[in-house]
Image: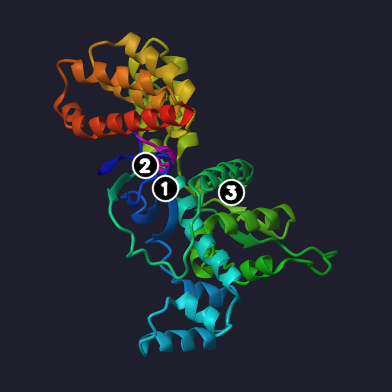
Amino acid sequence: MAIEGPLKELGIHDVFQLLDLSQKTGVLKVTSELRQNQGTVWFEQGSVIGAVIDSNPHPLGTMLVRSGKIAEADLMRARAMQQNGDPRRLGEILVGISAISERELTRQVRRQSEEVVFELMSWSEGYFSFQDRPVAEAPAEALIRTPVGFLLMEAARRIDEWSRIEKRIPNLQIVPVFAPASDGAGSLDLLPDEWELLGVVTGQDDVRALAGALGRPEFDVAKTLFGLASAGIILLEDPASKRPTAPPAGGLTFQIGEAEAHLVAGDVSAALAAAESAVAAHEHQALASLVYGRALIAARRFEEAADALWRAVELDTSTPVPLRYLGYALAGSGRFQEAGEVWDRWFDHAPKPTEEQALGPALEQARQAVLTLQLTLRSAHE
């Protein structure tokens, strides 16, 4: 069974939970035109066995050399053995020639896959598609199985940590520069990762560029920069703060447009701020409650989103759009039966604008996915 749809309507966390509870085997592809990026995750009976992403194409062998886990000569030897007909995975060859222990190899392969999953779980826009099929083609250098439950818990922990980091690093366009030296400065007692990062700081490259140069996850680089900035070793500059900004404007249309633009850009915090302003100034306008509910869904605050979208439904019964988003909010908060009932109202609503009618197949897939999840959970509790 194919499961697909936009991430704004069925969040990536919910997709992973569905594949886990349904014990699915197959391939999940997640694409983002905004990021010009695509990730692929292989599942076997609900567990993740491999993952790759276009924005970090570095193969495992290169990553092992960069991190000092193996010598470049060992990597060249292992690749030569493959070219000469050795059918083993590269990782298995490296273990066989004692270049790395099997335990360390597994740890590194798992970490590489996990970083891809964590990156995908940060996406609030894009499109996902899952296909049931054998996963023999998964490009793994070692066999791993990572439970989805662990990935979801770790992703939640990272979100909490990001909430602290983003006070200094609100986006990946932040550029670190060296702080002016003080007369009383002594020797620096830094960790190897910190020295490595300082070695590539140019005063021009942002967080994303530095992560790419080092072959390290953006989260790790941001976390290290946060520590260096807190110690006063570097300063963090936001190029966006130097750009001229448009003068503030009022009016519901402007505020909704601003919130919409931030949602498209994936800036959930800014979208929420704009939507909250719209609701505060136009509390009796359905469009204000609608965009606020959508921003709350993007922030994964599903219960609050459901309240806002119920209000949008009550304020304007002439359009089915709030019903569609209300169903997503209810599904996100685990109220699957209510979500199905609300979507039934969407399907029964007439008339529908042409662009809304075109969403019928995707909404039906989401409804079937929620039904499957509801039945799975019910069976698990019986």
Question: Which of 301 and 138 lies nearest the eye of the viewer?
Answer: 138
Looking at marks 1 and 2 on the same chain, the residue that comes earlier in the sequence is marked by 1
Callout in the foreground (1, 2): 1
Would you call the spot at circle 3 few (<14 residues within 10 Å), some (14-19), or many (20 or more)?
many
**Camera-nearest label, 3 or 2:** 2
Mark 1 and 2 residues: CB-CB less than 8 Å, in contact? Answer: no
Percent coordinates x, y for residue 357 in the rendering: 16, 27
Check disc 3 and give the amino acid type: Ile
Q: Earlier in the sequence, mark 3 or mark 2?
A: 2
Judged from the image, the secondary structure of the residue bearing numbered disc 3 is: loop
Give x and y (percent) for residue 251: 37, 20
Separation of marks 1 and 2 at Cα, in angstroms: 23 Å
Could you tell me residue 375's position as x and y percent?
Answer: 37, 28
Query: Which residue sits at x=34%, y=48%?
Result: 34
**Residue denoted by label 2:** 125
In primary-sequence order, the first of circles 1 and 3 is: 1
State which region is magenta: 10-17
Residue 181, placed above or below residue 98: above
Q: Which amino acid does the dot numbered 1 rest on?
A: Gly
Does residue 311 appear to the left or right of 108 in the view shown?
left
Picture disc at residue 229? none
Residue at label 3?
Answer: 169
